[in-house]
Image: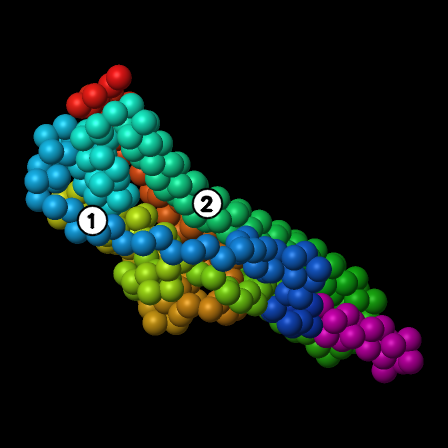
Amino acid sequence: MKFAERDLLFRLFKLCALLLLLPGCSTTIQTVKVSTLTANYCTPNVQYNNEAVPSQIPYNDSIAVRSIFSEHDFSLCKNLGLIPYINDYLNAGNVVESLVAKQRITDRYLVFSTELEAIAAELDCSGERVEQLANYIEKRNSRIVSRLTVASIVLGSATVLASTAFESNPVNNMINITGGAGTAVLGFWTLKPHEKKVQMAIERNLLSNIWYERNSDFVYPPSLWRILTETRFSNTDNSSLIRSIRERWIRYGFDDDENVKDLELLYFKDGGIYTAEQLRNLANMHNELQASIRGINQDLRSLIQTITTLPVRTQDLK
């Protein structure tokens, strides 16, 4: 074999090796954008004091309030801790007492509305952050597929050109075998590329409380948690909002052929290494939970309409 032929053959082997090593880089992405999106910037920077659990309502007071509200609105009043204030309003002895009681009702209602929107905003932020991360990984994966396709074309063209440069049949056979094998491997990697992944730690996992049905860390305000765990506020018969949300997560967040325990740790614990599809599932869970929590505003609308029309029962309005 002449020196020029050996040199050309060596260059072809070198090209094959370089092209075959293209997908062999680390699958975990570590870039500035990934570092930014995996930071827990959605976590509140202040700590909230937990509200006091509403005291037991005397039966007579409960009857008086129940006569004005529907069962649905009465349950909301109970969970928001409004019944004592409503009872004070109904039994006010003068204008001042009536106004003070009405202000307390309004204040408590506004506090709960703010708590609800705060949780919804945090879920919205987390869902958007995870979705951007999934989009970024998918773009990187698409770029890899494009490069593999180009590499396969380049290798095929180089094999054809190299085989025409040699007159020796053994050399031609070696070139064709090498080029064909390289093209086949690149084609396989194009169909099933090495997916890029990211490592993300979750310091405050709002999904965890829903999945395990406990709020011992008080991530959710107690009033909101009571509503989420009561069956009256769910469209599903004999099932709370939490149970309904959890069932929907199981349907689209877990595949039968995957390890459920591993995914459970990934989605509902402290994080781990995610693929783009897993990040997409995580974002969908955040978005669905956010929508369910914001849906409680529909329940509040009925309640506030009744509160604004409460009758004034005063003994002395002078």
Please state if 202 lies on the left or on the right of 218 as rendered. right
Q: Residue furthest front?
A: 318
Please state if 43 lies on the left or on the right of 51 as rendered. right
- Mark 2 Cα-neighbour bin, 10 Å: few <14, some 14–19, many ≥20: some
Q: Which residues are magenta?
A: 1-20
Above or below residue 268? Residue 114 is above
Question: Who is closer to the viewer here, 185 or 255?
Answer: 255
Q: Amino acid at mark 1?
A: Glu
Residue under pointer 1:
230
* Location of residue 302 in the rendering, given as x and y in whole percent from the top left corner: 25, 28
Residue located 65% across and 61% down the image: 35
* Location of residue 129 in the rendering, given as x and y in whole percent from the top left corner: 55, 51
SS of the residue at dot 2? Answer: helix
Residue located 55% across and 65% down the image: 200
Q: Main secondary structure of the magenta part?
A: helix
Q: Quarter holding the N terminus? A: bottom right
Magenta run includes residue 7: yes
Above or below residue 309? Residue 211 is below
Residue located 41% across and 45% down the image: 115
Give me the C-alpha separation between circle 2 and circle 1: 21 Å
Residue under pointer 2:
118
Question: Who is closer to the viewer here, 77 or 40?
Answer: 77
SS of the residue at dot 1? Answer: loop
Please state if 81 lies on the left or on the right of 3 as rendered. left
- Quadrant of the image occupied by residue 98: top left
The answer, for residue 216, to whether it is visible in the render is: yes
Question: Who is closer to the viewer here, 44 or 211?
Answer: 44
Please state if 143 lies on the left or on the right of 131 as rendered. right
Q: Which mark sits nearer the N-terminus, 2 or 1? A: 2
* Location of residue 141 in the rendering, given as x and y in whole percent from the top left corner: 60, 57
